[in-house]
């Protein structure tokens, strides 16, 4: 089954040209430099969550660099996280998996 797509070279009538061009530039930047974008996003996530129980378990001791994360934090499954998820679901608002309280789970 072929999927047809339409490439927009002009903004739809509901969007002004300046907004359209800025959006295109953003998309281009995000897709052209995916490695650096992903590294930056990971650094932001680690910086924001360095003091969570989860990251402390792996002895990061506040380290937020990519290499420390890769060498110390294993790939896990849902079942590995289930005890933490259950604590959060039961109302524990401490920084377990995230520095901000988690108020809902979506499936």
Image (cartoon, rainbow, N blue to C red):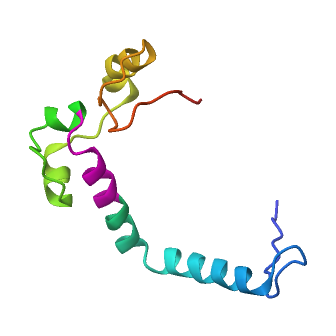
**Front in this rendered view, residue 80 or 29:** 29
**Front in this rendered view, residue 1 or 68:** 68
- Quarter-wise, where is residue 9 in the image? bottom right
Say whether residue 96 is left or right of residue 58: right
Quarter of the figure that contains the C terminus: top right
x, y percent for residue 90: 42, 12
Query: In the rendered structure, does residue 83 fall within the stretch colored magenta?
Result: no
- Quarter-wise, where is residue 4 in the image? bottom right
x, y percent for residue 19: 71, 80
x, y percent for residue 67: 15, 59
11 w.r.t. 89: above or below: below
Q: Residue at x 36, y 31 (%)?
A: 77
Q: What's drawn in magenta, residue-wise?
A: 42-52
Q: Which residue is drawn at 32% across and 58% down?
A: 44
Magenta: main secondary structure: helix
**Front in this rendered view, residue 77 or 34:** 34
**Front in this rendered view, residue 13 or 39:** 13
């Amino acid at each position: 089954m072929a999927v047809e797509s339409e490439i927009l070279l002009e903004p739809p009538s509901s969007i002004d040209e300046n907004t359209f061009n800025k959006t295109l530039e953003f998309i281009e930047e995000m897709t052209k430099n995916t490695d650096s974008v992903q590294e930056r996003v990971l650094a932001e996530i680690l910086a924001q969550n360095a003091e969570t129980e989860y990251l402390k378990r792996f002895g990061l001791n506040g380290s937020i660099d990519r290499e420390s994360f890769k060498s110390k934090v294993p790939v896990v499954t849902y079942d590995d996280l289930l005890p933490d998820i259950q604590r959060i679901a039961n109302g524990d608002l401490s920084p377990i998996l995230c520095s901000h309280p988690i108020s809902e789970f979506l499936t």
